[in-house]
Image (cartoon, rainbow, N blue to C red):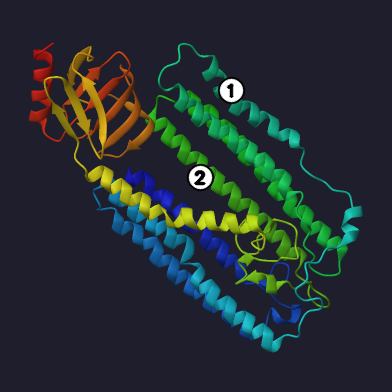
Amino acid sequence: MKYVLFPILYLCLIPVYFMLRNETKPKKNIILGVTLPYEARQNAAVLAICEQFLRQLNLVVLILALLPVALLPVKRTSVFLTLCFIWIIAAVIVPYIPYVRCHKRLRAYKQQACPPAERKGEALVDLRLAALPKKVVSPLWFLPPLVMALVPILHTLAAAPRDAAFPWMLFGYGINLLMVLLFTGLYRLINRQRAEVVDENTALTAVLTRVRRYQWGRAWIAFSWLTGLFSLGFWLLIDSVTGILLLALGYVGILMIVCIRTEFAARRAQESLTAESGQGFFADDDCYWIYGLIYCNPNDKHLSVNNRVGMGMTFNFAHWAGKLILGISALLLLAMPLLGVWMIRLEATPITLTLNENELIATHTKELCRLERTEIRSAALLEALPDAVKLSGTGFDTFLQGKFRVEGYGVCELCLNPETPPFLLLETAEETWLLGVESEAETRAIYAELTGNQ
C-alpha cells in the first residue's frame, strides 16, 4: 500500500509549490499578496524580497520532498499512514511560513515607500459592468455527467436479488452523484461572484472577470465529466481491487492537472492584461486580507470571492458562514493524526476467538460477534484468502475488518490478518464470517472442535 500512496503525497506538495512560486509575478497589481503601484514592481527592494522568498521556498519544499523517503522502511501500515497525515499537514502549512514572512516585509516596504492608493480598503464595484453582455459556458454540459452518475444508481436499485453489499454500493454511487451536483452548484456560484475592480478601466475589469469565469466554468464541467466517468468505471470494476485503485489514482491525477492548468491559464491572462495597470488609480483592499491569505471584509455581502493566493475561490471570513467553514476545515485537518492513532490501535490490537460449549466469541477492540454454535450452519478452514474487495471497514496489509465481497463466497464480515493463515469460514442463516488469529494452531484447534461437535 505504501508504494501506491507514496506518489499521492506529492500531489499535496507540488501544486502548493508552483502556486506560491507564481506569487512573485505581478497579477492585478499584486505581488506576494500585496497590492503595489506600477512603479514599485521593478524596485530593487521588491525584487530582493521576491528572490529571498524563492530561496526560502525552494529550501523548505526540498526538505519536505525528501521526508517521505524516510517513511518507506516503516512496516506497519497504520504507523505509515499516521506519519503521512502529519507530513500532509506540514506540506500544506509549512511552505506558507516563508510566504508570510516575505509578505510582511513587502507590506512594510509598501507602507514606507509607496503613497497610499486612492479609495484604499474599499470593496469596489464598477456598476457599468452590469450593462455589459455576459458570456458563460452552457449549463447543459452538466447533463451528460449527471446521467452517467445516475446509471450505476438506477442499475443497483433495479438489480435483484439485493445482497448485503447493496447499501454500501448505493452509498458509493450516491457520493459520486453528489459530487457532480456540487460541481454544478460551484459553476453557478463562480458566475455570481462580484467582479474585482483593478483600476478605472471598466473594459479591463470586464475582460478579467470573463477570463476567470470562463476558465473555471470549463474546469467545473471537466470535473463533472471526470466524476461521471469515474462513477461508471467504479461500477464496472466493482469486483477488481487493482482496477478500482488504478481508476482512483487516474481520477485524482487528472483532476489535479485540470485544476492547476485552469488556475495558471487564468493567472497568465491576468498577468498579461494587467501588465500596465496601476499607473494611476488602482484598487487596494489589502487591509481586508490577513497576510494576503484570509479575506475578512464585513462590508462585503458576498460569501465567496476569488482567492488572492492559491487556486479557485475562498470565503469571506467576516461572515458567520465563512467562520464556520474555516473552523470545520481546521478541525478536519488537525484531526488527521488522531485518525492515525485510532488506526494504530486497530492494527496493534490482537484478534481473539473464544469458543465454549454454547458459542464462539470474536473480539478485537470490542466484541465483534457472538455466534451460537447451533446457529453455525457450516465451518470451513481456508489455507489462503480469496480475492476480496472492501465495501466498508478497514483494509491494511496486515489487518482486514469490515464488510468485503469475497470471491466465491459473496459478502462476508472479515476480521483477520491476511498474512497469517489459515482462516475460519463460518456461515449462519444471516451472514458469513471470515475470522483469523495470529496463532495457526489456535485457529486449527477451534475449527477441529467446531466440526467435531456438529
Name the image quarter holding the C terminus.
top left
Amino acid identity at mark 2: Gly
Q: Quickly name the residue at label 2.
A: 253
Q: Earlier in the sequence, mark 2 or mark 1?
A: 1
Which numbered disc covers residue 283?
none
Q: Residue at x 51, y 39 (%)?
A: 251
Q: Quickly name the residue at label 1.
A: 151
- Residue 226 seen in the figure: no
- Residue 297 seen in the figure: yes
Vertical relation: 160 (above or below) 433: above
Amino acid identity at mark 1: Val
- Count neighbours of disc 1 (C-alpha within 10 A) and say few if under 14, some if 14 to 19, many if 20 or more: some
Q: Residue at x 48, y 11 (%)?
A: 160
Q: Residue at x 77, y 62 (%)?
A: 196
* Residue 70 point in image, percent of width and height: 29, 59
* Residue 192 point in image, percent of width and height: 77, 50
Position of 50 with respect to 391 (left or right) is right
Name the image quarter holding the N terminus.
top left
Secondary structure under tag 2 reads: helix
- Asked whether 257 or 199 is in front, the reply is 199
- Count neighbours of disc 2 (C-alpha within 10 A) and say few if under 14, some if 14 to 19, many if 20 or more: some
Indicate which label's residue lies in the foreground, 2 or 1: 1
